[in-house]
Amino acid sequence: MKVTTARQRFAAAPEALPLPRLRALIVFGALALLFAGLVGRSLYLQWIDYAFLQEQGSARHSRELEVPAHRGRIVDRFGEVLAVSTPVRSLWAFPDKFEASPEQLKDLARILETTPQRIAARLDAHEDFTFLARQIAPETSERAMALRIKGLHDQTEFRRYYPGGDVMAQILGFTGDKDAGQEGIELAQQPWLAGVPGSRRVIINRRFEAVEDVAAIRAPQAGRDLALAIDSRLQYLAFRELKAAVEANKARAGGMVVLDVATGEILALANWPTYNPNRRDKVTPEKMRNRTLTDVFEPGSTLKPFTIATALETGKVRPDTVIQTGNGTLSIGPNTIHDAHPGGALTVEQIIQKSSNVGSAKIALSLPAQAMWQTFSNVGFGTTPKTGFPGEVSGRVRPAKTWKPIEQATMAYGHGISVNLVQLARAYTIFATDGELKPVTLLKTEGPVEGRPAISPTTAAAVRHMLEMAVQPGGTAPRAQVVGYRVAGKTGTAHKLAGKGYAANKYVSSFVGFAPASRPRLIVAVMIDEPSGGQYYGGSVAGPVFANVMGAALRLLGVPTDAPVNNVILPADAIEVHEET
């Protein structure tokens, strides 16, 4: 048998053929195309699609954070701070990224003055994001962050602080968690006070922690300061006296307005009950209402001067015209109007001085209903005072064509019509001036403002004299007199509506007046709701409050006296005071 070796077999193999040239060109061409594609794609991504890639990268590794704007301050007319925003901190977390040991959770709860169970409940609320604490002191936040709990973050916010507390509460209102106005001036002037938030871009790590500031995209624009017409001294004075009167008379509530005659500025706006806007955890809506602007009531006899003014303007009566009131009753159909005291024959001046319902009703029935309605409309009843305050109401004056005789008669002394206290105070500017109705404002103004004519100067002067008589002995409000100043004003005592009629033992007691009567500077309007301490007449309940506030306010403002210091003359016996019904 023949054996062949490996060398022999190799030598016998046919010679290897060279790789065809075409195949080599194809392979190298394909490789070149792939390389060109990679280069092209790289250039495309680097130059053409750069913005898209940058956006995608930013979406994964950067965040745009809001930079809150500092809210403007609210100050009184002299620059005293009434509301200011202070920096605070808030703690937050993504629940699925939050990791704390039982000991850390216990320490965090102690710092936040809560329980571990409550913190756990917030984290288990099935939300992607949650706040563990809002608007806490910076030092509290620092102590919490020092625990180094994974997934716990903090951020700066602003919290509103109100130095005046409950005294200014219903005027200023308050802000919410994001320092945005929720009530009162804070809400009404939100665009002015708020400013414009800014923003900044930061790099975040995989734990969603900001590790580097990239850029400030937009700087925040701070809100602007706002100066109110309020005089803090008069506000505290009005608040103190109103609170004392409500408590002394065991009343349900009360309100007071102090108005500058020349400028229409509201210098004080007091309410009771009230609340502390710095601590609102247990505040009821009842205490939050600014009753002087959002609540209406029937003004009672404080409306009589407008009825008399209408009669004087139309020429139906003169101040010395005598009206027969008889035994103090007047029947109109099945209804009877009563006076508190029989007056017999009274002049128009005495009808205001002694507050005769019968006399006012008789004068009203001698007038066209449209003439009365026009006067009420001219002085702002039935329309809002236009202070810009949220929720201010217009009250109600029904169209004259719907009035029945009994309704026209009762409107003469303030029943069947509703007003708010600011409306009523504003309406009295026609008697404190030469017949001009002044606009009112909660914002500080510079110098006197022009009003619009509502009655003639002659009528204004005549009614002003009648209102001065009402405060003197023989009138319904001798307790509204002020030492050293001549005062003009009118009492009001109105039964409150209850269902389809009037409640027998529920009243609204009021007084509106101005001083000095020789050259009026201030108007003060007082309303006490449901006094139940034994007295309910406006002269006894609201009159003394007016006197205390008006006297102190005139002295604070340095208004010259226009009467001797012994001008106050009180009746020797209460029976001599002619209270109205």
Image (spheres, grey):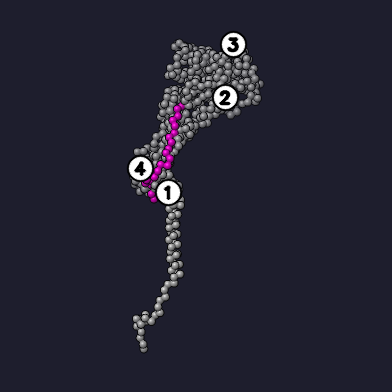
Q: Amino acid at mark 3?
A: Asp
Q: Is residue 24 above or below residue 55?
A: below
Q: Amino acid at mark 2?
A: Phe
Q: Residues within 10 Å of mark 2 (few under 14, many from 20)?
A: many
Task: Tell me, yes or no, whether the two marked residues, 3 and 4, touch with CB atoms within 8 Å.
Answer: no
In the drawing, what numbered circle is on residue 320?
3
Q: Quadrant of residue 114?
A: top left
Q: Which mark is nearer the camera, 2 or 1?
A: 1
Q: CA separation, marks 2 and 1?
A: 60 Å
**Residue 17 or residue 465, whichever sits in front:** 17
Badge 1 is on which residue? 58
Task: Tell me, yes or no, whether the two marked residues, 1 and 3, touch with CB atoms within 8 Å.
Answer: no
Q: Residue at x 35, y 38 (%)?
A: 139
Q: Residue at x 60, y 16 (%)?
A: 313
Q: Which mark is nearer the camera, 4 or 1?
A: 1
Q: Element type at marker 4?
A: helix
Badge 2 is on which residue? 381
Q: Residues within 10 Å of mark 1 (few under 14, many from 20)?
A: some
Residue 498 lies, in percent from the top left, at: 57, 28
**Residue 251 or residue 47, whichever sits in front:** 47
User: As drawn, which residue projects farthest toward the front?
Assistant: 21
Residue 75 lies, in percent from the top left, at: 43, 28
Q: Element type at marker 3?
A: loop
Q: Which residues are magenta?
A: 205-228
Q: CA separation, marks 3 and 4?
A: 80 Å
Q: Earlier in the sequence, mark 1 or mark 3?
A: 1
